[in-house]
Amino acid sequence: MKQKIVLFDGVCNFCNDRVQFLLKHDKKKELRFASLQSDFVQNWVSENGVKLEDSMYFIDGDKLYSHSTAVLRIIRELGKGWKLLYVLSLIPESIRDNLYRRFAKNRYRWFGKSEVCMIPTPEVRNRFYL
């Protein structure tokens, strides 16, 4: 089975809330998670020779998705009615990513920032790469 890993900003309150949402709605429990600040991500970046911006990413097997495309791909993984939102992928990526970047630029101001990355509870710890 190919890995499906959500890379997120571990100090962003909004991002941490989205991870909690995904944990609750990923009924198949296929999604895994890693904060951009984690050793796992730093090693992955080094091994794969990529540069990550301050964005949400989705690793689906050997493919890396970023910005709005990552969000839509992640939502599609939730199945059921959630995957209907994938219709938003019909909006040109440049428009979606422009909106994504505007939101991302203000997320700390609107939702706050933690001093440290979230610590997964024992019940979900096995779904995180640290």
Image: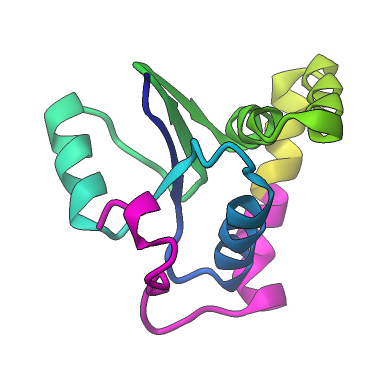
In the displayed structure image, the side of residue 3 where residue 100 appears, left or right: right
Residue 114 versus residue 130 in the image, above or below: below
Q: Quadrant of the N terminus?
A: top left
Tell me which segment is drawn in magenta.
102-130
Apparent side of residue 24 relative to residue 89 in the rendered image (left or right): left
Q: 72 above or below 89?
A: below
Nearer to the camera, 74 or 121: 121
**Relative image position of residue 68 (x, y in whole percent):** 66, 34
Image quarter for residue 128?
bottom left
Please tell me how many numbered marks the rendered image carries.
0
Residue at figure coordinates x 63%, y 66% from the top left: 17
Relative to 114, 40 lies left or right: left
- Please determine whether, in this image, residue 6 is positioned above or below residue 123: above
Q: x, y (%) of residue 61?
A: 38, 19
Quadrant housing the C terminus: bottom left
Q: Position of residue 25 (x, y in %)?
A: 69, 49
Q: Is residue 123 magenta?
A: yes
Dividing the picture into quadrants, the one containing residue 89 is top right
Residue 36 in sight in this render:
no
Residue 19: percent from the left, percent from the top?
56, 57
**Residue 5 located within the stretch drawn in magenta:** no
Name the residue at 22% across, 37% down. Answer: 45
Say which of 21 and 116 sits in front: 21
